[in-house]
Image (cartoon, rainbow, N blue to C red):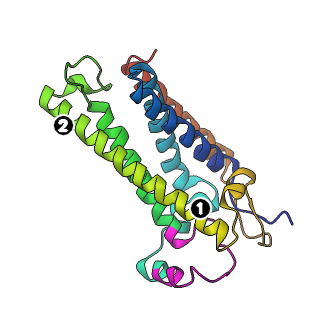
Amino acid sequence: MAGSRIWDLPTRLFHWMLVLLVLIAWQSAERRDISLHVLAGSGVAGLIVFRLWWGFFGGSTARFANFIKGPGAVLGYARSLFTHKEPALGHNPMGGWSVVGLLLVLLGLTGFGLFASDVDGLDSGPFADFVDYDTGRLASHLHARFFDGLEILVALHLCAILFYHLVKRHKLVHAMVTGRQAHLADGAFTPGSRVMLGIGVVLGMAVTLGLAHLGGAF
């Protein structure tokens, strides 16, 4: 069965582009390729801006109002983790808060990266010139700590995917590729408008290109 449509194309592209750019940013930092690191980080910042916009104006399952639930809903869902109840149409209450956590960590990671400065002050973020040396070094330290936090959240995310695949038999990766979740009848999915999508893409591109230019990536 094809299942129900739960993820629109913009949400899926955001997800996989974010994975790719975070990996590029990580590897470029390891190799001290600062130009590529700034370019990838600028792309991540642009994606975050797009996702925040899409969280208010996108498809129904991408909207924050659809998956950010209160403590009661989260606890209620946690009690059902080891049952084989049907998957939610989109993020479940626990997964919704994991999305919020990832976005907040990425905001901190990219935000402090904008002001980060290395020891000799040569390799710096786009806005490092607006702060003094000590502030730039503090931003660099916090940039690294937020990356540590991102690693923890990614590890938890991968563990959750494995749990859902082995225990609950929900193919979350497949759904994020195809946009459809098996074992669900067609639900009340509503796509976002093309106008809102266009605005979100323009905003994300403007942030990416602006930061990359300021950071000397091109």
Check disc 1 and report the residue beneath it. 161
Residue range (magenta): 75-94
Asked if residue 51 is among those painted magenta in the image, a careful observer would answer: no
**Who's the residue at 51% across and 58% down the image?**
157
Does the magenta stretch mainly form a helix, a strand or a loop? loop
- Mark 2 secondary-structure assignment: helix
Is residue 43 or residue 162 the one in the foreground?
162
Is residue 176 or residue 81 the one in the foreground?
81
Establish if 137 lies above or below 79: above
Q: Residues within 10 Å of mark 1 (few under 14, many from 20)?
A: some
Establish if 147 lies above or below 92: above
Q: CA distance from mark 1 to mark 2?
A: 35 Å
Is residue 211 or residue 80 the one in the foreground?
80
Instruction: Indicate left or right for 37 with 189 as reference.
Output: left
Q: At which x and y percent is residue 185? A: 80, 73
Check disc 2 and report the residue beneath it. 138
Is residue 38 or residue 48 the one in the foreground?
38
**Who's the residue at 20% across and 30% down the image?**
136
Closer to the N terminus: mark 1 or mark 2? 2
Q: At which x and y percent is residue 102? A: 44, 54
**Who's the residue at 71% across and 64% down the image?**
189
